[in-house]
Image (cartoon, rainbow, N blue to C red):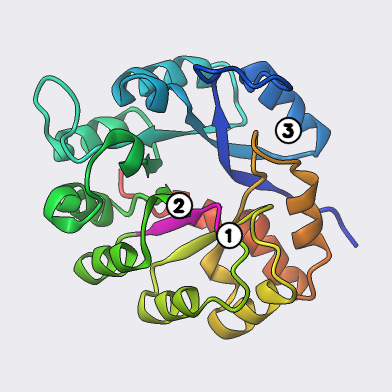
Amino acid sequence: MAALKLIACDALVGLPRKPFPWLQPDAADLRLELDRLDIARAVVRHRQCLENAPHWGNALLAREAATEPRWIPARCFTPDGVPDDFSPKADVTAALMEGTRVGWMSPKEHMFSPRPWCAGALYAELAERRVPLFIDYRQLTPDEIDEILTAYPALRLVLLTVPRLGRSRNLYALLARHPALRLCLSFSYSVHEGLEDLVAKFGPERWVWGSGYPEAEAGASVTLLTYSAIPEESKALIAHGNIERLLAEVIA
């Protein structure tokens, strides 16, 4: 069994306001983690987007990523854009001009509704430019996911930290209704033969891979994908091929 090329799509770097007693998830620590598990690249979000202002965290991420060639920096977006023009369109345009190819949102922490009445202008712009939008599954309700993708069916929404749900009635229905919806396979999804069933029903293109950094031991995610009973070609798509395609299809 050949080792998979891995691109982790869910790394969150940066020190929290209340420090973890057991680790320091800074740039140096993430570098060691990528080395330890031979992870080729990582889509990286910055915790300071949550602890402080999103635009300040984005600027900090850009500075740190400049010396980390394996990082794929993800831009934190809010529906009002950034100072001084507060325009979602201008924010997305500026991000693309700076080389950003991935976005993410955290509605609960930033205290806004993810529904289209509030964030619709941002979704429209991201969908038009084919920018993948990463959101933690815990940030949205199934009804909100359905409402967003019904209004913006071309939005490339990727759900992170998909939980152990067994044969989730919500998850299967959402995947069936919304072809642009994708899931991140990580430590939190440990359903017996769940990946095999979802790949058989919806195809391997609906997944990207995540390490769970720094929340979890990434070896669990590596094992989950490596030893799953799906074709090697499907494993390669999940491990790196799908996210590489999504990045390549962004309209800069």
Q: Could you say where residue 93 lies in the image, as x and y percent from the top left?
A: 22, 36
Instruction: Determine contact: label 2, label 1, CB under 8 Å.
Output: yes
Q: Answer whether residue 147 is visible to the viewer in this image.
A: yes
Task: State the residue position of label 1.
Answer: 163
For badge 2, the amino acid type reads: Arg
Judged left or right of residue 117, residue 244 is right
Q: Which residue is under mark 3?
A: 34
> What's the residue type where badge 1 is placed?
Pro
Q: Which residue is mark 2?
A: 138
Which residue: 53% across, 53% down?
243
- Is 9 inside the magenta-drawn segment? no
The quarter holding residue 86 reads top left
Name the secondary structure under disc 1. loop
The magenta region covers 156-162
Of marks 3 and 2, the one in the foreground: 2
Quarter of the figure with the N terminus? bottom right
Q: Earlier in the sequence, mark 1 or mark 3?
A: 3
Mark 1 or mark 3, whichever is nearer to me: 1
